[in-house]
Amino acid sequence: MSPFPLTIAHRGAPGRRENTLAGFRDGIANGADWIELDVHLTADKAVAVHHDFTLGGRLLARMTLTEARERAARRRFELPTLEEVFTAVPGHIGVNVEIKAPGIGAAVLHELVQRRAVDRTLVSSFDWPTVRALASRKPRVRTGLLADSPVRDAAGELRRARADTLVVKHRLATARLVEEVHSAGFQVLVWTVNRPKDLRRMIALGVDGIITDYPERMAWLRLGR
């Protein structure tokens, strides 16, 4: 376990720049070791970086990438692809890819292979069957179970999913949970932690990574401020 948790920029930067190339660059410039982003599959099988299932009231999965980008442009925001993110982000920066829509793990893994990014990626999802399905695919990518409610037998759930990491809402993180997961050989990431007192508590618990809108606050804490 690292003596200081990884700093993971939540969607790059908060507000209008989230899930954009500019936002990811800002997060890295402000001290992030990793970035976190959300993906969907478009109707023409592009892996698009976007949080919501809809864009302008229409399902992203029912639009081509061109159609989705035209709709995004009218609303003055960027809609990058996962390919573009890996092209823009330096190779030493890790990427936590959250799969929003169930069943698109194979398409995401294909993109990681094409970009030679398997080794620097963690793929996570609230849809645990999607995570379990990835475990049977080659090459093996690190996976995480996302949870926003208490997880009974966290170590057992990770084993059953053949996952590597529990990615849990920070209010659910306790010393007991972190010890259970670490003792079983897995890691714990927490989200989304913004207040300095909460950041300090997560650091004290010994979590492996902290997803935050403000990576610069983690940088200050790393320096002992």
Image (cartoon, rainbow, N blue to C red):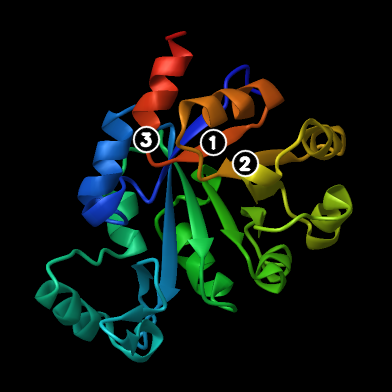
Place of residue 77 in the rendered image (x, y in percent of width and height, measured from the top left):
17, 65
Q: Which of 223 and 143 is in front in this view?
A: 223
The furthest residue to the top: 224
Neighbours of disc 3 within 10 Å: few (<14), some (14-19), many (20+): many
Q: Quadrant of residue 58?
A: bottom left
Callout 2: helix, strand or loop?
strand
Q: Residue at x 32, y 34 (%)?
A: 28
User: Marks 1 and 2, how far apart in space?
Assistant: 6 Å
Q: Nearer the viewer, mark 3 or mark 2?
A: 3
Mark 1 sits on what residue? 210
Instruction: Give coordinates of residue 53: x percent, y percent.
Output: 42, 78
- Would you say 199 lies left or right of 79 here? right
Residue 44: percent from left, percent from top: 34, 86
The residue at which mark 2 appears reads as 189
Estimate the x, y position of residue 221 in percent, counting from the top left: 46, 16
Q: Name which residue lies at 45% across and 37% down.
A: 194
Looking at the rendered structure, the kind of residue marked 2 is: Leu
Q: How crowded is mark 1: few (under 14 residues within 10 Å), some or many (20 or more)?
A: many
Q: Mark 1 or mark 2: name the one nearer the start of the chain.
A: 2
In this picture, is 3 found above or below 82? above
In the visual, does 112 lie left or right of 26? right
Which labelled disc corresponds to residue 214? 3
Q: Mark 3 or mark 2, which has the lower sequence index?
A: 2
Q: In which quadrant is the C terminus drawn?
A: top left
Front one among 163 and 179: 179
